[in-house]
Image (spheres, helix red, strand yellow):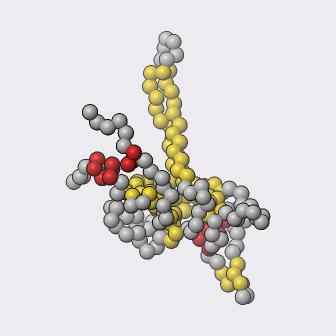
């Protein structure tokens, strides 16, 4: 009889080494676990202690039959895949993702960040890398679109984090060395 559960497959994705990486739209994603990230990928920096939140929403349509109105079939009408995180580092990349700001420019002895009058959708390629000891999982997103931004607080108790939500559009896959998945993997010609 097979084991009912395996404690070794329980993950806590909080080990050092995890990060959210961002690159310009169209940057090549790794296709294998052992492949290094393209040098165009830049880490967004330290995140809040909430880490990365992944959302999956599937809307359905229930088709009812006659007589009695019982459900005879369910079809999916839409799927949304989201990644949310709060960036704690106040950096040019965080400003680009949060404000939709263009590149930082020199302004005398300082720098200037121009915030667009109408903030558009920021697009890029993303990799979310999570670690649990020696087990690593990389979520590879061909096209990430920053669709939502949370409030940014400025006070003397909290870090001024920039909260964003990415919508995953197009190719989206996970590369991992987790033993349960490596053992279950099949070779595709």
Residue 20 spot, x, y in % from top left: 51, 63
Say whether residue 175 is left or right of residue 94.
left
Q: Picture coordinates of residue 42 (x, y %)? A: 51, 71
Q: Image point 54% across, 47% down: which residue?
A: 55
Residue furthest to the right:
155
Q: Quadrant of residue 121?
A: bottom right
Q: Quadrant of the N terminus?
A: top left
Can the viewer see residue 63? yes
Residue 120 visible to an observer of this rendering? no
Q: Quadrant of the C terminus?
A: bottom left
Q: Residue 107: percent from the left, percent from the top?
A: 71, 84
Nearer-the-camera pick, 22 or 90:
90
Compared to residue 102, the image places residue 63 above or below, namely above
Residue drawn 50% across the image and 53% down it: 168
Is 59 displayed left or right of 48 in the figure? left
Q: Position of residue 86 (x, y in %)?
A: 62, 60
The structure residue drawn at horizontal position 49% and vertical position 24%, both measured from the top left corner, is: 63
Q: Residue at x 71, y 57 (%)?
A: 151
């Amino acid at each position: 009889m097979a084991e009912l559960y395996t404690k070794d497959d329980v993950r806590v994705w909080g080990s050092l080494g995890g990060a959210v990486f961002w690159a310009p739209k169209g940057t090549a994603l790794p296709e294998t676990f052992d492949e290094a990230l393209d040098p165009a990928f830049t880490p967004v920096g330290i995140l809040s202690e909430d880490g990365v939140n992944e959302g999956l929403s599937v809307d359905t349509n229930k088709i009812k039959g006659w007589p009695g109105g019982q459900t005879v079939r369910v079809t999916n009408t839409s799927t949304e895949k989201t990644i949310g995180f709060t960036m704690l580092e106040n950096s040019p990349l965080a400003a680009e993702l949060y404000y939709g700001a263009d590149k930082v420019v020199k302004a005398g002895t300082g720098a200037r960040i121009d915030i667009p009058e109408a903030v558009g959708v920021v697009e890029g390629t993303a990799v979310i890398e999570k670690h649990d000891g020696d087990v690593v999982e990389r979520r590879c997103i061909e096209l990430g679109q920053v669709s939502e931004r949370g409030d940014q607080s400025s006070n003397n108790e909290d870090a001024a984090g920039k909260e964003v939500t990415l919508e995953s559009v197009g190719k989206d896959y996970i590369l991992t060395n987790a033993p349960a998945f490596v053992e279950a993997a099949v070779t595709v010609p």
